[in-house]
Image (cartoon, helix red, strand yellow):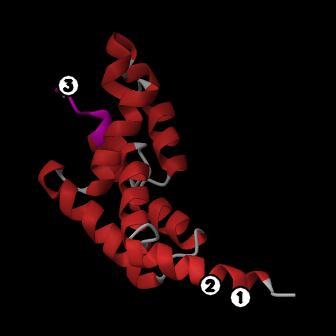
């Protein structure tokens, strides 16, 4: 009786030849999705590594995310702004924003954002 590895090897080769199995594309797509969800780069890197992607694939995916966000002030700032908007923190609270500043800073810190990034994301005044 054949083992699962010997049965799956030809199927995997066919899928890779067709382009259906592509770790680089998967890593880039996952990194972009996680950034849009408001995850900092450290968390994105950890989740890509947890999925079993090679270090070079993780590095390329992070560079792609950072390159796309350079015009917006950095990938972490873009992710922090997405998180702030989704959770309605900071200026999204309206007049009560000052009362909740410490609480909002703590929420961003627990997500893994630096002090400076959290401060910039919360003090943003324009709405995209």
| Quadrant position of residue 40 | bottom left
In which quadrant of the rendered image does the C terminus lie? top left
Tell me which residue sits at (29%, 49%) in the image: 77
Residue 48 against residue 6 in the figure, above or below: above
* Residue linked to disc 2: 9
* Residue 99 x, y percent position in the rendering: 43, 20
Q: Range of the magenta residues?
A: 121-127
Under circle 1, the secondary element is helix
Q: Is residue 11 left or right of residue 23?
A: right
Q: Earlier in the sequence, mark 3 or mark 1?
A: 1
Q: Is residue 46 left or right of residue 89?
A: right
The CA distance from mark 3 to mark 2 is 51 Å
> Around disc 3, counting alpha carbons within 10 Å, would you say few (fewer than 14), some (14 to 19), or many (20 or more)?
few
The stretch drawn in magenta includes residue 125: yes
Residue 39 against residue 27 in the figure, above or below: above
Under circle 2, the secondary element is helix
Question: Which residue occupies the extreme left position in the image?
Answer: 71
* Residue 96 x, y percent position in the rendering: 39, 14
| Quadrant position of residue 5 | bottom right
Foreground label between 3 and 1: 1
Q: Are marks 3 and 2 in contact (CB under 8 Å)?
A: no
Q: Are marks 3 and 1 in contact (CB under 8 Å)?
A: no
Looking at the rendered structure, the number of numbered marks drawn on it comes to 3
The CA distance from mark 1 to mark 2 is 5 Å
Q: Are marks 1 and 2 in contact (CB under 8 Å)?
A: yes
Under circle 3, the secondary element is loop
* Residue 110 x, y percent position in the rendering: 55, 48
Q: Earlier in the sequence, mark 3 or mark 2?
A: 2
* Residue linked to disc 3: 127
> Around disc 2, counting alpha carbons within 10 Å, would you say few (fewer than 14), some (14 to 19), or many (20 or more)?
few
Q: Residue 67 got which mark?
A: none
* Residue linked to disc 1: 6
């Amino acid at each position: 009786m054949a083992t699962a590895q010997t049965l799956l090897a030809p199927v995997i080769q066919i899928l890779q030849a067709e382009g259906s199995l592509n770790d680089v594309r998967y890593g880039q797509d996952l990194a972009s999705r996680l950034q849009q969800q408001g995850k900092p780069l450290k968390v994105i890197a950890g989740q890509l590594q947890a999925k079993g992607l090679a270090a070079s694939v993780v590095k390329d995916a992070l560079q792609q995310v950072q390159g796309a966000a350079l015009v917006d002030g950095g990938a972490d700032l873009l992710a922090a702004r997405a998180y702030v908007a989704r959770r309605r923190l900071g200026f999204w609270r309206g007049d009560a924003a000052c009362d909740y500043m410490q609480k909002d800073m703590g929420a961003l810190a627990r997500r893994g954002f630096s002090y400076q990034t959290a401060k910039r994301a919360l003090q943003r005044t324009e709405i995209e």
